[in-house]
Image (tube, rainbow, N blue to C red):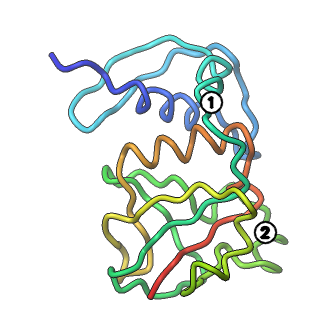
């Protein structure tokens, strides 16, 4: 049997341990981890997984160039399994109204909303009439791990790069 992808375990734990407010509810919970091909129970603490964060990222840039991205009022970011990792739920409504959920930028030199040290990932596809970026399982796990530490998704520091 293939070994469970450790980053998938991390992301699953963070998703399940996070409440609607974006804060961790429990520091030690058992989790069913789903990867692309299998599910196994694991026991870890959220704090242990937070130690895997690599950088102090200020935001997220999803590179959608070459895919034909269309703008939307309420886009959703999904992983290759179809799991939503960013969307209108669990976000501050007042912030969404004043800022919008994401910033659409067609020039990499003009990215400001994601801050000086953004995590940059490449979309592998688009969903929902070409409005919703889909990222790889590995990239979605990295996004969730890094977000757990710096909360850039909660702050709406998300940019879609398009052409």
Q: Is residue 72 above or below residue 31?
A: below
Residue toward you, 48 or 98: 48
Q: Which mark, by number, is residue 93?
A: 2
Residue toward you, 72 or 135: 135
Is residue 57 found left or right of 3 in the rendered image?
A: right
Residue 106 at x, y percent in the picture: 54, 87
Quadrant (top left, top right, bottom left, bottom right) of the C terminus = bottom left
Q: Quadrant of residue 52?
A: top right
Q: Is residue 121 above or below residue 163?
A: above
Q: Residue at x 44, y 80 (%)?
A: 131
Residue bearing the label numbered 1: 17
Is residue 116 found left or right of 159 in the rendered image?
A: right
Q: Is residue 78 above or below residue 4?
A: below
Residue lying farthest to the front in this orientation: 109
Q: How many other residues sit within 10 Å of disc 1, few (<14), some (14-19) or many (≥20)? A: many
Is residue 71 found left or right of 46 in the rendered image?
A: left
């Amino acid at each position: 049997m293939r070994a469970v992808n450790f980053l998938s375990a991390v992301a699953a734990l963070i998703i399940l341990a996070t409440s609607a407010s974006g804060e961790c509810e429990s520091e030690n919970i058992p989790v069913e981890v789903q990867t692309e091909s299998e599910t196994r129970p694991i026991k870890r603490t959220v704090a242990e997984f937070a130690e895997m964060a690599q950088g102090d990222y200020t935001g997220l840039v999803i590179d959608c160039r070459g895919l034909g991205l269309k703008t939307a009022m309420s886009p959703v970011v999904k992983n290759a399994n179809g799991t939503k990792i960013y969307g209108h739920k669990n976000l501050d409504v007042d912030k969404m109204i004043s800022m919008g959920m994401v910033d659409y930028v067609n020039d990499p030199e003009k990215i400001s909303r994601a801050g000086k040290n953004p995590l940059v990932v490449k979309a592998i596809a688009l969903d929902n009439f070409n409005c919703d970026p889909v990222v790889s399982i590995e990239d979605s796990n990295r996004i969730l791990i890094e977000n757990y530490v710096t909360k850039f998704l909660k702050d709406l520091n998300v940019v879609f790069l398009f052409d």
